[in-house]
Amino acid sequence: MRVLITGICGFAGATIAKWLVEHIESVSIFGIDNLMRPGSETNRADLKRAGATVIHGDIRNPSDFEMLPKVDWVIEAAANPSVLAGVNSSGTSRQLFEHNLASVANTLEYCKVQGAGLLLLSTSRVYSITALTNLPMEAGEDAFRLDCSKPLPRGVSAQGINGDFSTEAPISLYGSTKLAAEAVALEYGIAFDFPVWINRCGVLAGAGQFGTPDQGIFSYWVNAHLRRRPMRYIGFGGTGRQVRDAFHPRDLAELLYRQMKTSRRDGPRIYTVGGGATNAMSLAQLTHWCDSRFGKHQPEPDDRPRKYDVPWIVMDSAHATRDFDWRCGTSLPAILEELASHAEQHPEWLEVSGS
């Protein structure tokens, strides 16, 4: 089996590539990356040592696909992954569109010509900010909790959010490019008869993740706490109660492989995947964990709201479990310990990440 991974030098792409090489016999991994993300260059040598063929190119350029070999599957892991992309200093709205949507059209044309299947990595941020903000919440001592004693909208339960939850605008510029990419990918698959699987991922986390305040929050928080950097609880009263779930991209890699192996031609194509309720944690709870691991360091409260922030996102992976017998295998304590050990071994990591 031959697999192309776009954005292969990013955290998700590199981890998925290494998992496939380690676990799948007779797999050939090819990857393309423009190396724009700070830190991505550090993964290129490791990937080559693992046996992957890494090509320096930009999938925003149709001609760069002429360098790529014929493959059986494409894992689309290239994107600007920040929910603030297009509205902060990390890039313009046009650049966001080119990275997250226009480039996907080039990938889909490549899949059409090669007859390759597509596995598109999407995001939990395709869901309606208004609907998420209006979920009934209990403000616990250190975390928001879904109040299941009150009526809940379609697509959410104590286990988290599933694919039936509202995607009505606003969902952020970032979320809208990913949602549009999903729709175009599904249409290409139907029109040109190649398989498409879409995974709306929760927060990916683990050793080697590039962490900044607006993307890779678990990695950023652990590294910043260890180094006693200034940190802030932004919005929601400045208490750090906002909650996310986390899962490791090696667990995602296993799901992608199971999707590649299935021969099913009908049924759902979009799945929500993440750590779920058992792997969920607030920023305040993450701070408590870091305090116990590294010693006390208190973030400053900043109750000013930040654009696109929501109090609680937890992903329900029940449909992926039902259809692919897949479960998140790496516990949140294991992820945090992995992050902490990496942070201790790489004192320069925030600078490497561009933070």
Image: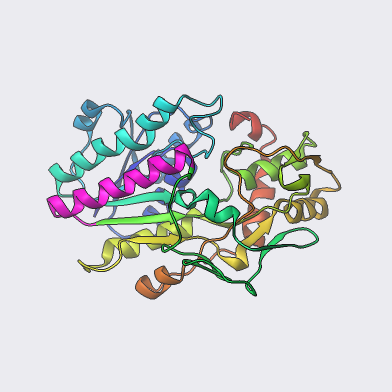
Q: How is the image coloured?
A: rainbow
The image position of residue 333, as x and y in percent, is: 67, 61
The image position of residue 104, as x and y in percent, is: 30, 39
Q: In which quarter of the image is residue 230?
A: top right
Q: What stretch is highlighted in magenta?
A: 172-195
The image position of residue 327, as x and y in percent, is: 47, 69
Q: Would you place residue 48 above or below residue 340 in this image? A: above
Is residue 188 highlighted in magenta? yes
**Overall secondary structure of the magenta stretch?**
helix
Q: Which residue lies furthest to the right in this view?
A: 296
Q: Residue at x 56, y 43 (%)?
A: 209
**Which of these two is toward me, 197 or 239?**
239
**Which of these two is toward me, 9 or 122?**
122
Q: Residue at x 17, y 55 (%)?
A: 190
Is residue 175 highlighted in magenta? yes
Q: In which quarter of the image is residue 194?
A: bottom left
Q: In which quarter of the image is residue 331?
A: bottom right
Q: Which residue is drawn at 33% across and 65% down?
A: 258
Q: In which quarter of the image is the N terminus?
A: bottom left
The image position of residue 245, as x and y in percent, is: 59, 58
Q: Would you place residue 344 above or below residue 275 in this image? A: above
Q: Can residue 72 be seen in this view?
A: no
**Which of these two is toward me, 211 or 106?**
106
In the drawing, does residue 238 fall left or right of residue 93? right
Q: Residue at x 69, y 49 (%)?
A: 340
In the drawing, does residue 78 fall left or right of residue 194? right
Q: In which quarter of the image is the C terminus?
A: top right
Tell me how many marks there are. 0
Q: Is residue 245 visible?
A: yes
